[in-house]
Image (cartoon, grey):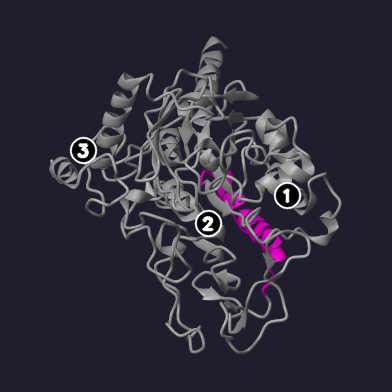
């Protein structure tokens, strides 16, 4: 009898050990232009409710000092998927269009490729905006029977459904795999949006390209169908992978939504919900779709071991000031600036992680810096994988935070990108140094004391300025933030490195 009890105890111990080391399913939900103030659980003055995002906050960890790596779209998406800052690539400013070589070079590790190599089913559903090679150069004579190359299926994803870029970059169709379900053989320009200050992309469409800026568009494409279609396709794919997940082959879903980026086009059923006009309705609709994903996880019995990351590619679009004036809603969450800005409102975004099985002491808020570039190292850490020197060079695992352990992030780099401002900033702990350019002085802020960045204290703190200048210089010229073998950036010196001379860059980058 004692022997039987002994073996039973051993069996239970081994079962617990195996269970605790089971790889989690992972879903990354990425919204577009959603500010830090656009989650009601994180903003007591929000003029609308986001119950499903609030649930993520209350059942997970809210990183209230979480950052996209840029203040615009393409660079942030590159950083999120690769764990490397996009300014190390050929893209130094702005975003890219629909039809061009993918910014993620062949052989570069991504979240998808790393997880796929470690036994995951992988899918991407939504907006890509990192470049893909679409056949043909003439919009009126493209051969849509030819496959698209250098796209998500070539970057580690087993399945792709979505659109090539933002809705203002104009090759608009529902793509599945390497082909458009209905080819974009028609044309349209921006139409008036009766609900917002922006535009719409909706029929009627023309068979002839006019002299104005025209989008290539499929006859069945309508802008306000994006959220529903993406969620439907994501759920369809997840349903096919639940059995695999229960048998030990987990799934990874990257779900980048198009909202609340222009065009702000909530479905008519949401009209009048909240107290922030069409923008608030659009966020409410987005929240509903996130709720659909969460319900599927629960109904399928995989909720407990599914890690969800929710975040946004940058701060809110410029219409944030109109919402403050008209609705008393601050999408920026009280921070300075918004999309394209080097100030906190440009890149401090909602950043929430929920993982019932893996997070210790849920419902916490973490107020120290973390970055979206950290997802690669974090996921690798969780599944027990070591990154090579030439992958995730700027990625640091925040898994200790999920385990409720001590953690300190290495310096984070952020960037302004638009309206003539392309400055860089470095944040270490509470200190943030914004580098000078031809039109702006050096700026230093203590974000704990002055989170709204109201008054620079650079002159009073020369030692901190010098320390942070040395650190940002090393991060740029060594090709990495983390420890490891120095790596090359993809280009030589460029003009936005105003605090480093061309000769200094060449000398240090050659080491």
The disc, 1 or 2, on the residue closer to the chain's N-terminal end is 2
What is the x, y in percent for residue 483?
27, 32
Q: Which mark is residue 123?
A: 2
The disc, 2 or 3, on the residue closer to the chain's N-terminal end is 2
Say which of marks 2 and 3 sits in front: 3
- Residue placed under numbered mark 1 in the picture: 292
Q: CA distance from mark 1 to mark 2?
A: 17 Å
Question: Magenta residues?
Answer: 221-249
Residue nearer the viewer, 312 or 497: 497
SS for dot 3: loop
Instruction: Look at the magenta stretch and give its main secondary structure.
Output: helix
- Residue at 70% x, 58% y is 264
Q: CA distance from mark 1 to mark 3?
A: 44 Å
Residue 202, by quadrant, is bottom right
Q: Is residue 224 magenta?
A: yes
- Residue placed under numbered mark 3 in the picture: 485
- Residue at 59% x, 50% y is 33
Is residue 48 visible in the rendered image? The answer is no
What is the x, y in percent for residue 478?
23, 39
SS for dot 2: strand
Residue 126 in the image: above or below residue 211: above
Q: Is residue 428 magenta?
A: no
Residue nearer the viewer, 395 or 323: 323
Is residue 207 visible in the rendered image? The answer is yes
């Amino acid at each position: 009898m004692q022997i039987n009890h002994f073996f039973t105890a051993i069996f239970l111990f081994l079962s617990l050990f195996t269970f605790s080391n089971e790889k989690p399913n992972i879903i990354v939900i990425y919204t577009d232009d959603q500010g830090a103030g656009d989650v009601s659980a994180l903003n007591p003055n929000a003029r609308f409710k986001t119950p499903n995002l609030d649930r993520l906050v209350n059942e997970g960890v809210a990183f209230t000092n979480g950052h996209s790596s840029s203040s615009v779209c393409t660079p942030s998406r590159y950083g999120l998927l690769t764990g490397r800052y996009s300014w190390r690539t050929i893209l130094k400013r702005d975003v890219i269009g629909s039809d061009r070589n993918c910014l993620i070079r062949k052989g570069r590790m991504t979240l998808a490729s790393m997880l796929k190599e470690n036994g995951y089913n992988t899918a991407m559903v939504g907006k890509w905006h990192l470049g893909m090679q679409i056949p043909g150069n003439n919009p009126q004579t493209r051969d849509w029977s030819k496959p698209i190359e250098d796209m998500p299926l070539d970057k580690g994803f087993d399945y792709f459904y979505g659109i090539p870029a933002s809705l203002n970059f104009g090759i608009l169709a529902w793509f599945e795999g390497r082909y458009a379900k209905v080819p974009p053989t028609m044309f349209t320009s921006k139409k008036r949006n009766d609900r917002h200050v922006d535009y719409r992309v909706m029929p009627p469409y023309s068979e002839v390209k006019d002299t104005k800026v025209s989008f290539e568009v499929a006859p069945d494409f309508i802008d306000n169908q994006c959220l529903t279609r993406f969620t439907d396709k994501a759920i369809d794919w997840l349903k096919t992978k639940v059995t695999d997940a229960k048998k030990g082959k987990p799934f990874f879903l990257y779900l980048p939504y198009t909202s609340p980026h222009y065009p702000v086009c909530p479905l008519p059923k949401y009209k009048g919900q909240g107290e922030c006009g069409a923008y608030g309705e659009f966020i409410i609709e987005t929240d509903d779709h996130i709720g659909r994903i969460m319900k599927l996880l629960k109904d399928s019995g995989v909720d407990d071991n599914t890690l969800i990351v929710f975040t946004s590619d940058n701060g809110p679009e410029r219409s944030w000031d109109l919402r403050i004036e008209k609705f008393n809603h601050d999408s920026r969450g009280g921070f300075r600036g918004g999309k394209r800005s080097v100030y906190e409102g440009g890149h401090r975004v909602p950043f929430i992680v929920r993982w019932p099985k893996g997070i210790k002491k849920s419902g916490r808020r973490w107020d120290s810096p973390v970055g979206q570039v950290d997802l690669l190292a974090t996921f690798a850490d969780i599944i027990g994988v070591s990154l090579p020197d030439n992958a995730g060079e700027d990625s640091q695992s925040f898994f200790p935070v999920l385990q409720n352990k001590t953690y300190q992030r290495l310096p984070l780099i952020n960037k302004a990108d638009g309206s003539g401002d392309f400055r860089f900033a470095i944040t270490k702990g509470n200190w943030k140094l914004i580098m000078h350019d031809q039109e702006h002085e050096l700026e230093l802020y203590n974000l704990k004391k002055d989170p709204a960045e109201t008054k620079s204290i650079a002159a009073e703190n020369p030692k901190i300025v010098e320390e942070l200048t040395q650190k940002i210089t090393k991060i740029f010229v060594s090709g990495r933030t983390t420890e490891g073998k120095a790596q090359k950036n993809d280009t030589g010196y460029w003009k936005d490195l105003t605090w480093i001379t061309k000769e200094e860059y060449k000398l240090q980058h050659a080491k």
